[in-house]
Image: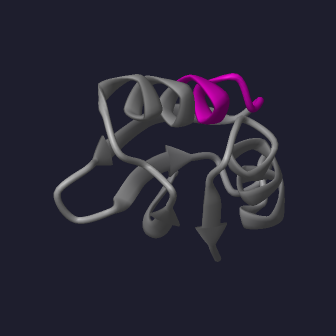
Amino acid sequence: MTKNVFSVSGMKCGHCKLNVENALKAVKGVQNAEVSLENANVTVEYDENVATPAQLKDAVDNSGRYEMTV
């Protein structure tokens, strides 16, 4: 299991936080995702043999007006 912190731009409220967390949790291999609005980032715990950072980025980028830096 890998735990990484990724920057996410475009998040402004609790709704944004839930959108990003839910998008990441829907990716196969993701065990947990926790957004920090204050730090504009997300901590993701995932199985690196199942999910890739590129897949995580795609999930976030396609979930609204957000952009995740990998």
23 within the magenta span: yes
35 within the magenta span: no
Which residue corresponds to the image point at 39% horizontal and 34% vertical from the top-left? Answer: 17
Q: Is residue 42 left or right of residue 21?
A: left
Q: Answer with the quarter of the image where residue 59 lies.
A: top right
Which residue corresponds to the image point at 25% horizontal and 50% vertical from the top-left? Answer: 36
Q: Is residue 57 left or right of residue 40?
A: right
Q: Answer with the quarter of the image where residue 54 lies.
A: bottom right
Q: Is residue 15 left or right of residue 38?
A: right
Coordinates of residue 67 in the picture (x, y in percent): 65, 62
Coordinates of residue 58 in the picture (x, y in percent): 82, 52
Which residue corresponds to the image point at 62% horizontal and 53% vertical from the top-left? Answer: 66
Which residue corresponds to the image point at 56% horizontal and 23% vertical from the top-left? Answer: 22
Q: Residue furthest left?
A: 38
Q: Nearer the viewer, residue 56 or 66?
A: 66
Q: In the picture, which quadrant includes the C terminus? A: bottom right
Residue 42 vertical position relative to residue 14 in the rendered view, above or below? below
How many numbered circles are shown?
0
Residue 61 vertical position relative to residue 9 in the rendered view, above or below? above
Q: Residue furthest bottom?
A: 70
**Colour mapping used in the image:** one colour
Question: Bounds of the magenta span?
Answer: 22-28
Coordinates of residue 47 in the picture (x, y in percent): 64, 47
Q: Is residue 2 left or right of residue 55?
A: left
